[in-house]
Amino acid sequence: MSTVPQTKAVMNKDTQSLPVSTLPKVVGLNEGDRSNLFMWMIDGFSFLKNRTEVTRYSGNFKACGFTWRLQYDPNDTSDGFGSRSLSLRLFLVDNDTSSNSVVQASYKLVIYDQLKGKHVENEGVQYFHESPRYSLYCKVEMSKFCDPDRGLLVNDCCIFGVHVHEASLVKLVTDGVLERWTIEKVIKERKFTWEIKELLKQNEYLISDIFDAGNCKWQIKLCTRRVISKNYLGVFLHLNSSSALPPKTGICVDFSISILGQKLAGRNQFSLESPSFGEVVLLERKEIVPKQSYITCTLEASVTVLGVVNIS
């Protein structure tokens, strides 16, 4: 096996008082030293293993035009049997791909056997996108990794590596898509309360104050029973800022509106062409008698903007 050049790692202030022999040395081969191959040696592995707060990542390196780093986990229990394993994964750092493309990479992960050359390896093809950025792994049980006869950990030193064979951008198959939803990363519910006095004595149309939800401005509109019918009320959610939307763009919203014992709830798209949505609800007789000329009520609304809709 080729000799790995050794350089002393820069440690944090918590390690300055420790003897040099106890400090781990982390060494890698840069892109220019070995094309598309990165080797990572940790001299003093037990020190890192016993410090749970230590980040288990290598430095960044370039291969096939992308920036990567290795990650190891000495406490991997993903096999479901409760036994601890050491797993090694490749991590894509500069994931600046668009939503219509991913990075396809063919690579081999290696945990090196320093005595007999019987390395632990796993090779395959992985598609890297925003989540998850990795899934292919190389794994060995910790009991075997620490076995001195296996050669994976010798004199408290281990070597991990990855050979990136190929990596390229791959365009996703999206031909024929007519409507695209882009869901927000952080979704927040906005609640709004409207106190309405003498509802049935008001004008034919009532409009609430403007309130904000999901970086948009909204209003509630009521159409009284004078306009529709004796025992009915029109309840509508209106996107007040629809004029700011680009053409063929909408806002996807979950909402609910409660008034006089009735609840209107659903999911709808609001746009410049269709800024309002609502229904006519039946008012229960007990809600409008005996003094139907001056009902005072509270309207409660909940608006959650899910994301943006683009229509081709």
Image: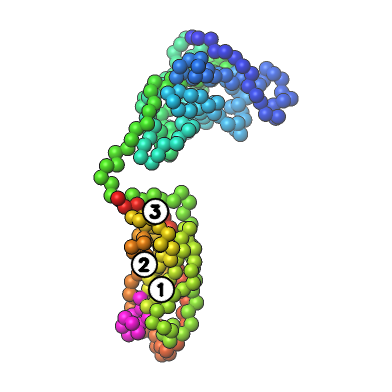
Secondary structure beneath dot 2 equals strand
Q: Position of residue 106 (x, y in %)?
A: 37, 24
Q: Earlier in the sequence, mark 1 or mark 2?
A: 1
- The residue under label 2 is which amino acid type? Ser
- The residue under label 3 is which amino acid type? Val
| Residue bearing the label numbered 2 | 276
Q: Visible in this render: residue 173?
A: yes
- The residue under label 1 is which amino acid type? Lys
The part of the chain drawn in magenta is 224-234
The residues tagged by marks 1 and 2 sit, at their Cα atoms, a distance apart of: 9 Å
Q: Residues within 10 Å of mark 3 (few under 14, many from 20)?
A: some
Q: Is residue 73 left or right of 204 when viewed as pictured?
A: right
Q: Residues within 10 Å of mark 2 (few under 14, many from 20)?
A: many
Q: Main secondary structure of the magenta part?
A: loop
| Residue bearing the label numbered 1 | 221
The image shows residue 266, relative to residue 185, as above or below, that is below
Asked whether 21 or 171 is in front, the reply is 171
Q: Earlier in the sequence, mark 3 or mark 1?
A: 1
Secondary structure beneath dot 1 equals strand
Disc assigned to residue 308: 3
Q: Residue at x 40, y 76 (%)?
A: 222
Q: Residue at x 51, y 14 (%)?
A: 33
Q: Position of residue 161 (x, y in %)?
A: 48, 20
Q: Position of residue 140 (x, y in %)?
A: 46, 23
Secondary structure beneath dot 3 equals strand
The reply to whether discs 1 and 2 touch (Cβ–Cβ < 8 Å) is yes
Question: Residue 232 colored magenta?
Answer: yes
Q: Residue at x 59, y 21 (%)?
A: 26
